[in-house]
Amino acid sequence: MPTWPQHLEGVGWSLVMAAKSSLPLTGAKMKTPLHTYSIMLVLLSLPAVLQATTARKNDIDIYSFTVDSKVSSRFAHTVVTSRVVNKADTVQEATFQMELPKKAFITNFSMIIDGVTYPGNIKEKATAQEQYSAAVARGESAGLVKATGRKMEQFQVSVNVAPAAKVTFELVYEELLKRQLGVYELLLKVRPQQLVKHLQMDIHIFEPQGIRFLETESTFMTNELANALTVSQNMTKAHIRFKPTLSQQQKSPEQQDTVLDGTFIVRYDVNRTISGGSIQIENGYFVHYFAPEGLPTIPKNVIFVIDKSGSMMGRKIQQTQEALIKILDDLSPKDRFNLVCFSGETTQWKPSLVLASAENVKEAKNYAAVIKAQGGERLGSPAGWGFWGTEHGPGHLAGSHPESVRPTATDINAATLRAVQLLTRANQQELLPAGSVSLIILLTDGDPTVGETNPASIQKNVKAAIGGQYSLFCLGFGFDVSYAFLEKLALDNGGLARRIYEDSDSALQLQDFYQEVANPLLMRVAFEYPSNAVEEVTQDNFRLLFKGSEMVVAGKLRDQSPDVLSAKVSGKVHLQNITFQMESSVAQKEEEFRSPKYIFHSFIERLWAYLTIQQLLEQIVSASDAEKQALETQALNLSLKYSFVTPLTSMVVTKPEGQEQSQVAEKPLENENRHRNVHPGHTAFKTHSVGDRMSRITAGTFQKLPSFPRRFGQPGPLHPPHRSFPPHHGMLLPDVLGKLLSDPLEPSFPKVIIKTARRVGPASPAPGITPAVPAHIQAPPVILPLPGQSVDQLCVDIKRSQGLMNLLSDPDQGVEVTGQYETEKAQFSWIEVTFKNPQLQIHASPEHVVVTRNRRNSVYKWKETLFSVMPGLKMTMDKAGLLMLSSPDKVTIGLLSWDGPGKGLRLLLRDTNRFSSHVGGTLGQFYQDVLWGPPAAADDSKRTLRVQGHDLSATRELKLDYQNGLPGTEISCWSVEL
């Protein structure tokens, strides 16, 4: 699975120093060994990524690295500057390597070597082709840009650096940030791999609509580095600065290695109302953003077309099933749906679309669960019967006919037309609700191999059948599918194409895509402006507006345009038409962008050019041969005028005399990645930040628990009588003992002697302490701090099958914890924490953690660093696999991937005095009025616990405390069984 959730778009930067030694070949003339060093810079959506390895440290020194990003009304302008010096006494090769978003356009690259600037010149691709071909003929690697990962492209330039010489690399790129699932994202990947004297990142955001929320995430943030990050914000502006000192970058005072290795993300959204949107005007150009809040969702009719050919066998079909089952659960009761499966033959679940009632969804989920990628799907027969559904009908014996199973047959044409026919027939029979939206979602992992196999014919057939009535979305699973074919198929029919990457999060990629189109808000949206006021307007008619997205229209104001720009946006909401009218004062709007600190001037003109080129490139995909030439010419002219590296232009990078005289940077196309299994890194964990300065945290440690008010009766002895322990089992804790003795217990409870918890592990034991832990001592599923004091704890063992468990629920705290416990394995199969504010869900399984916010999923692996601060919640994870969820006024909840005895998921609670009187649940009940009975007469290590009117037996036992991580601590606690 990729290092970042498919929804990430931002900035990544990384500077890399690599030292290489060229050794003479056998038989070749001996030369002085040449050491070369490379500097790697990587940029993402607002990103630059630097990676570095050093064979001989300090030969080439990165003494300055800066990223300056200005986001003006969604349009991001990023400048990455790297300064290096060659400290060696020989010539070194410096390689500048960076990643940038696929949707971004490079606008400038230059190198300054000994005061001489070597610029990158953007030319028509055909003009640069001669230089490109000549370089290839010389055996040189002329292509400077290649696709990497899900959303990134890699740019690389090398240059020889003389001893003591300095080189400055500067790269500029621009991108319009796209709103997906309610957020804009800028991603920064930081990996310098050496200490940098001056390392600084500045992101300025200016949004005249007002910033609704702002979050930052990081996978490398430490206690020291958190002090180097500042986030300041007011109603319309935000400034994020990251400027660590050399000591803050160090792993430790003894080590010269850098701790900076991970990702940094900025997410935000703007304020919105039910209105015609927001118009921004600057330097004679305008941009109109439209994403009204509060509109009801339009009912939809959706058909899922699923490839079940042999190539989908195994993990692909399992992930498809998993995603489909969850997607079916998300259908609205007002929606109608059906399932079509295909390989060589096409089958459908129901004869026609059905309402998404609870009964129909349950039946569809059962159907989806037994789809088999073997040329047919098992029709509910017992395992091993070998019956399949084929064109010969249900129950035909697989293998009794040579055509009954075709593992590699794929008939995309027939399957897609079947879906169209189902919608058309239902429409003709007036079975679809008036004003509803009809969608087809096609998932395939390969090219058509049977039936109609000519891509152009399939595209023609489908377009004719749909006739502009429905929207088709195409998902290409992996790299064995022709993305260009799917992209045209989708764009021809009002949809879009998306690649699903083969990885552990493929099911979540499918779910996230569905969430993008799950809630249509408006149909047939049209933007209108006075013809005497504007010209050269970008696309102003759209088929559908989905919740969480945004429509963007830009254009040029005429020379003699009115002082007030009026706009009308019309569309259809379910059964009625809706129109928004708005007016904007040109002078007033232009005044908003006069501050040079927060914007780069003429940005709306460049935004208009960027958006126009992107839309022209999409139109070229669907255009006829006769139309393509005019569209390409228009896009090319704009690319050259505004110095954008697009699929129609190339950037020629010049170099000093005596080196390769030029290299050519060309923008790769998505389909060029075919058959390349690109496995980008995975965004492990996050750091959300809102407000002035990020709070400090020490990973893997717990603060001392506060004392709790005495709402309950005391539980009695903290340890059983001394005779129940092995000899020398512990020693006195004077401070704790003194506190307890100075605070007399109630008369019915005896005074106690308290012994220390003993750390289990290889550390040298104190005199008289036995280091070994009895093999039978296990970590209980849950350890709860007892209410009323901060020393004793309750160990909860779950012995009876509980099914889905409501572990904790506190409506006043706005938190709920549920889980599934497997008694056979004696562990949780999953634990889920849901917060009401912020609206957030954390689903933890033994494999990974999935965080869902705003219908957007992020996947994180256990034992990766996480520092995440968002409004109302802080989320951190350390390398021990401890995930902590905390807030100043909430109970702290911890989830742990425990590898010690009793391996599995564990739950931790802190600050339990913050529970309200309404707390409940299997574990929450212990924070209500709990009554302890007196010790048993014959054995004072046994007590009775009355909880919610029920009596539970509590026994003093030795357990392994997992709360501070491995290797664990042996403790004595009151143990109860549920």
Image (cartoon, rainbow, N blue to C red):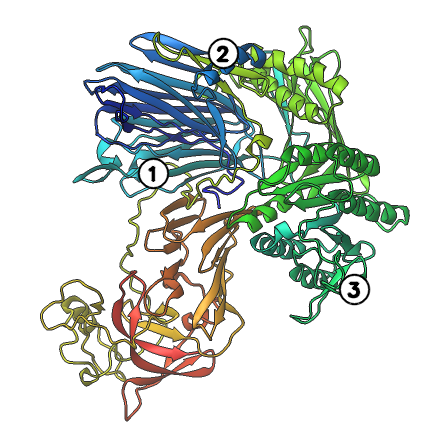
Mark 3 or 1, which is nearer the eye? 3
In this orientation, which residue lies closer to the viewer: 188 or 916? Answer: 188
Tell which circle, 2 or 3, labels the residue nearer the N-terminal end.
2
Mark 2 is surrounded, within 10 Å at the Cα level, by few (under 14), some (14 to 19) or many (20 or more) other residues, namely some
Location of the C terminus by quadrant is bottom left
Q: Position of residue 263 (x, y in %)?
A: 40, 38
The residue sitting at 13% across, 77% down in the picture is 728
In this orientation, which residue lies closer to the viewer: 651 or 322? Answer: 651
- What's the residue type where badge 3 is placed? Pro
- What's the residue type where badge 2 is placed? Gln
Residue 281 seen in the current view? no
Mark 1 is surrounded, within 10 Å at the Cα level, by few (under 14), some (14 to 19) or many (20 or more) other residues, namely some
How far apart, in angstroms, are the residues tagged by discs 1 and 2? 37 Å
Q: Position of residue 829 (x, y in %)?
A: 48, 65
Q: Residue furthest right?
A: 429
Q: Position of residue 19 (x, y in %)?
A: 27, 28
- What's the residue type where badge 1 is placed? Asp
Tell which circle, 3 or 1, labels the residue nearer the N-terminal end.
1
Q: Position of residue 424 (x, y in %)?
A: 85, 45
The residue sitting at 63% across, 45% down in the picture is 445
User: Which residue, given by chain and number where applicable, does mark 3 sit on?
Assistant: 394
The residue sitting at 55% across, 43% down in the picture is 501
User: Which residue, given by chain and number where applicable, does mark 2 sit on?
Assistant: 131
Residue 481 location, quadrant: top right
Mark 1 or 2, which is nearer the eye? 2
Residue 308 seen in the current view? yes
In this orientation, which residue lies closer to the viewer: 937 or 390? Answer: 390
User: Which residue, given by chain and number where applicable, does mark 1 sit on?
Assistant: 261
Q: Is residue 14 above or below residue 847?
A: above
